Image (cartoon, coloured by chain):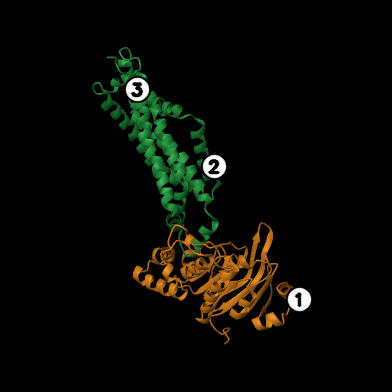
Chain colours: A orange, B green
Amino acid sequence: MNKENNQVLLEIKDLHKEYDTRAVLDGIHLSVHKGEVIVVLGPSGCGKSTLLRCLNGLETIQGGDIEFYGKSLTGPNVNWQETRQKIGMVFQNYDLFPHMTVIENILLGPIKVQKREKKEVMEQAAQLLEKVGLLDRKDAYPRQLSGGQKQRIAIVRALCMNPEIMLFDEVTAALDPEMVREVLDVILGLAKQGMTMVIVTHEMGFAQAVADKIVFIDAGKICEISEPEEFFTNPKTERAQQFLNIFQF
Amino acid sequence: MQNLGVNVLFEGTTIQRLLEGLLVTAGIAFLSIIIGSLLGIGMGLLRTSQSKTIQFICRLYLEVFRIIPILVWLFIVYFGVPSALDIHLDGEIVAVIVFSLWGAAEMGDIVRGALESLPKHQIESGKAIGLSFWGLYRYVLIPQAVRRMLPGAINLSTRMVKTTSLVVMIGVIDVVKIGQQIIERSVIKVPTASFWVYGLIFILYFIICYPLSKLSKKLEAKWEN
């Protein structure tokens, strides 16, 4: 199915990001269509995580523009509180709030930020928890959960805000290898339901399985945008080829 | 029968007077801890502000209270300020003002330390679910910071209770002053009066401060689980 014809959700235009004077993102152009799953690959420090953080306003940008539904997300007048409700994000570190139970973690945003009815949110949270197989842990505290469970809860917490798009920033990088699968399965399930996602990962097999489009970034620039099949079997650029070779023994 | 010195405590209204004095001490300390903590939380939030000017002013405020002895502060506010402004301030009120301001400075430092010790991704994940600045502090940062600042805050509270004994110097009749009065009255009859009276005061301070440290241990244990 070609999702290129779908509505454009996010449009990144000539994005520049610098730390001090060092360019981290150097002219990124990318459109994210509704329902599309984009996997961003690249060597460590290439700027892929920074790109995601820019999309959620956690980094200020030095040039270019990001548009969400055609509305600019740059400048001082952006209402990030409102935008972030539509752009969900899950981080590498287990970022649950340690002083709240699982269900309190999930309800915080919908009830306090979105002012929704507790009963309605509870039902949605229960459904989502059921789906990730953790309904029975809803009253547990984060420290009582494994890393993989925490990440699945973090995903549910983001989903319960009913976002239009989800950003995943190396969500399995800090996990025990045995727990990677359970988290990736959840994300794969989301892809099947048509969730729009931008995923940064180092799991190549997963990237190939989940992506509609692979975006390969090196040194702050997009080197290559390809279909996953093509990228993994026959990358267009030499840099991408070198990168892929690292993962082969 | 030999006169036991301990009897000095049970003569007349001795114990009642000491307890009244204790009430003055505890009242000043309690009020100051409450006011100081509230101001201190505000101070702590200000100290995590990005603005260098605000940071500098708050830092200066803290250092001024650390460098100048509390006794001197009591004198400044009790003798200095009223004479400059031509007003009269009660010793008790002066004590509450000075101890609250001191408490605010120290508590601000404790709150700042606790807030800064929280992992940065807690802030980011709070932002990521759309929390506002205040929502972030109210639901995510402060509840976690409170747990971390508790030992320091309780320690500060017991220090404040103990330091209230300085209020004698600005004419407040607290538990120590009443003890001195009782000793002066009875020391000729009972040479060991100071031992017994100060001994009792020792126990009274312990009775105020011990539950505080017990409480902090309890809360810490509760939040562990």
Q: Residues within 10 Å of mark 2 (few under 14, many from 20)?
A: few
Decide: marks 1, 2 in contact (CB < 8 A)? Answer: no
- Mark in front: 3 vs 1: 3
Determine which residue is flagged by label 1: A238
Q: Name the residue under label 3.
A: B196
Looking at the rendered structure, the kind of residue marked 1 is: Glu
Q: Residue at the spot x=46%, y=43% of the render?
A: B151
Residue A178, picture quadrant? bottom right
| Quarter occupied by the C terminus of chain A | bottom right
Q: Earlier in the sequence, mark 2 or mark 3?
A: 2
**Identity of the amino acid at label 2?**
Phe
Q: Residues at badges 3 and 1 in contact (C-beta under 8 Å)?
A: no
Figure quadrant of the N terminus of chain A: bottom right
- Subunit ID for the residue under disc 1: A
- The alpha-carbon separation of the residues under discs 3 and 1 comes to 90 Å
Q: Which mark is residue B188?
A: none
Viewer can see residue B65 = yes
Q: Is B195 left or right of A218, judged from the image as shown?
A: left
Most extreme residue toward the top, as rendered? B188
Residue at the location (38% across, 70% down)?
Answer: A121
**Secondary structure state at the residue bearing disc 1:** helix
| Chain label for disc 2 | B
Where residue A8 sits in the image (x, y, percent)? 55, 79
Residue A18 x %, y %: 65, 61
Pointers 1 and 2 within a single chain: no
**Of B133 and A166, the residue lying toward us:** A166
Image quadrant of residue B99? top left
The residues tagged by marks 1 and 2 sit, at their Cα atoms, a distance apart of 53 Å
Residue farthest toward the front in the current orientation of the protein = B1
Q: The residue tagged with tag 2: helix, strand or loop? A: helix
